[in-house]
Image: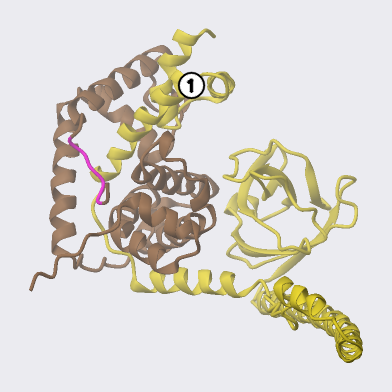
Amino acid sequence: MSTDTVKPSDIELLHAIARSDEQALASLYDRYRVILFGLLMRILNSREEAEDVLQDVFLQVWRRASDFDELRGKPFTWLVTLARSRAIDRLRTLTARSRAAAGSANDPTEAVSDAVADTFRSEQRGIVSRALTQLPEEQKILLILAYFEGLTQCEIAKRLGAPLGTVKTRMRSGMIKLRELLADKVQSFGL
Amino acid sequence: MDHEEIKQLLSAHALSALDNSDLRAVEQHLADCVSCTTDLAEWRSTAASLAFAAESLEPSSVVRDRILSEIREEKRRPTNVTSESVIAFSPSARRNLWTSMGSLGTIAAALAVVALLVSTIVLWRKNNAARAELSRLNSEIQLTEQQRQRDRELISFLSKPGARVAALAGTNVAQSAHATIAYDSNGAAMLVASGLPVPPAGKAYQLWFIVGNQKFPGRVFTIDASGNADSKDQIPPAALRGSVFAVTLEPASGMSSPTGAIFLLSGS
């Protein structure tokens, strides 16, 4: 007997969450916890902070699922944008704290157990990593500093000692190139 | 800035990399431009793909438990006093009653039924009043319990070595509001606030740590139906000494520097 079951799409899960279906939230969490936690760890470099923000993100999803507007983007984009925004806010509150010290307190990470999801993530990671390696170094560094460190264009210009106009031009060129390289290649788990 | 200039900034906006002046111009333009709003959604999708560049990592299993436990608690919080109907007053039953009134016996029986109904309605009203009172008492008990929980947490904070406490008073926009912030020598802090007005949709309160001209953002928090809130936070080391604490009204996603009115403020 086939054990295949049709998994609900992300949009279906969000609609169910908006109706206070906690199982739907658990499913969405199970689907995206690893990719979101990886992102939060990359930004915050602290397991404790990243787990705290991950919890905040899914509580926000629980409270604001009805605000999600599928005409304005995919659920995956919404989730990642929410998680990253929360992480950058948290990062800014920790500006005076030594991130290196926070990083040294990291615990070893637990193994990723879902082989199928792991394979999917590896494929997507490969696509994005290959795309990044094809970007000129001076464009790639700008995207990394903005996305993972939450720096604005002025802050990046200061950090790199580059003219602001150059930073703006390179960042835009980098994003255009990245969009071309990723066109239709990156997917979320539940379309 | 014209439409074409704004379009040039959308990819940077998707990375949250715009500085304040550009950000304001883009947000004003987006309020009226469907084409740019659609473009921004595409740029955000491209930016979100960068999440895959981070290493996949598994959070502790306790995070899932904490989230599910919290949402169950949230679902439980509103006390739903069941409003079961005491009397099922069906219109069709009423019609049958009136059409059957053809004799004195029927009239007498009908009068008895009416008397019974009147007394039942009186009892029903009393029952409703009792239920409303019960509901009010339940809400009070729940609020008291929440207050006790906050007090317990505050006391626990204050019992830490080197703990300090500061009072925040309501400003002229929230004169009945007040709050207490307790914090330890590592900067772990807990804010307990009361009497805050319900914020408009899309807005929430945010705590700030102010040292001289520097304003360090704290967490965004929401209030319960009675205007109470408790929020744990982390005071940055630079703000641990001589900091003034303030609470402002900000966009619900929080801000990196204060933009809204001050509702609560501590002394210097």
Name the kind of residue labelled 1 in the image.
Answer: Val
Tell how many labels.
1
Residue B26, image x and y in percent? 53, 21
Q: How far across and how far down the image is residue B84, in percent?
A: 69, 80
The chain painted yellow is B
- Percent across and percent down for residue A145 are 36, 34
Quadrant location of residue B180?
Answer: bottom right
Residue at x 39% of width, y 17% of height: A168
**Which residue of the protein is positioned furthest toward the left in this rendering?**
A1
Whether residue A187 is in magenta: the answer is yes
Q: From the viewer's perspective, is B263 left or right of B214?
A: right
Q: Is residue B29 left or right of residue A58?
A: right
Magenta segment: A185-189
Secondary structure under tag 1 reads helix
Q: Which chain is the one coloured brown? A: A
Mark 1 belongs to chain: B
Q: Which residue lies under the disc numbered 1?
A: B34
Q: Main SS type for the magenta part?
A: loop
Residue A45 seen in the figure: no
Q: In the image, what residue occupies the spot 26% across and 65% down?
A: A109
Of residues B105 and B3, which is closer to you in this image? B105
Position of residue B204 relative to residue A19, above or below, is above
Question: Depth check: A22 or A50 in front?
Answer: A22
> Dot 1: within a 10 Å radius of its alpha carbon, few (fewer than 14), some, or many (20 or more) residues?
few
Residue at 52%, 71% in the rendered image: B70
Q: Is residue A8 above or below residue A173?
A: below
